[in-house]
Image: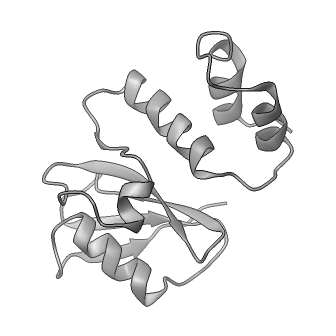
Amino acid sequence: MITRLSRMIFGCHLDLIPNVLKEDHQIIVGGKFLSDKHINFAQRLIKMQNSNIGGLLCTLNFSKRCFKPFTEPAIQMIHTRGNHWIVVSTIESTTKISVYDTLYLDLEKDTRELILYMFGNSTCNIIKEDVQ
């Protein structure tokens, strides 16, 4: 099943962005493991369409903490648990950090600490949002 996001990424945009291979399309629509290359590509597309949104940085920056904490509302995909991606955001509220995770109900300690560092607030509420 092709999701709306994968249609956006690999539908009309496939011929516009040369570094996307047809094999990548099969990985995404086939539900296979997404690498940092796929996630970074998706974030670049989102950033191209929404340049006013903060975040959407290269995911490798976060494993090395090579970034400054966000000072504006932002959204970011991060790698966690060795083989899983989550989305964190302050777009809808500046008083909470929303976490979108389709698989796990809790956050690992390291992930929680990274999220608080990302948004420069060790006291901000992290809220696990309901997702499908």
Query: x and y percent of residue 115 in the render?
Result: 33, 71
- Where's the C terminus, which quadrant? bottom right
Query: x and y percent of residue 47 in the render?
Result: 38, 31
- Where's the N terminus, which quadrant? top right
Relative to 72, residue 101 above or below: below
Q: Is residue 127 left or right of residue 18?
A: left
Display colour scheme: one colour
Q: Is residue 26 left or right of residue 81?
A: right
Q: Is residue 115 left or right of residue 84?
A: left
Residue drawn at 82 percent across, 50 percent down: 31
Residue 118, image quadrant: bottom left
Relative to 21, residue 64 above or below: below
Count the labels in the image: 0
Point out the residue furthest to the bottom here: 109
Relative to 67, residue 30 above or below: above
Residue drawn at 42 percent across, 78 percent down: 111
Query: x and y percent of residue 40 in the render?
Result: 51, 42
Residue drawn at 40 percent across, 23 percent down: 48
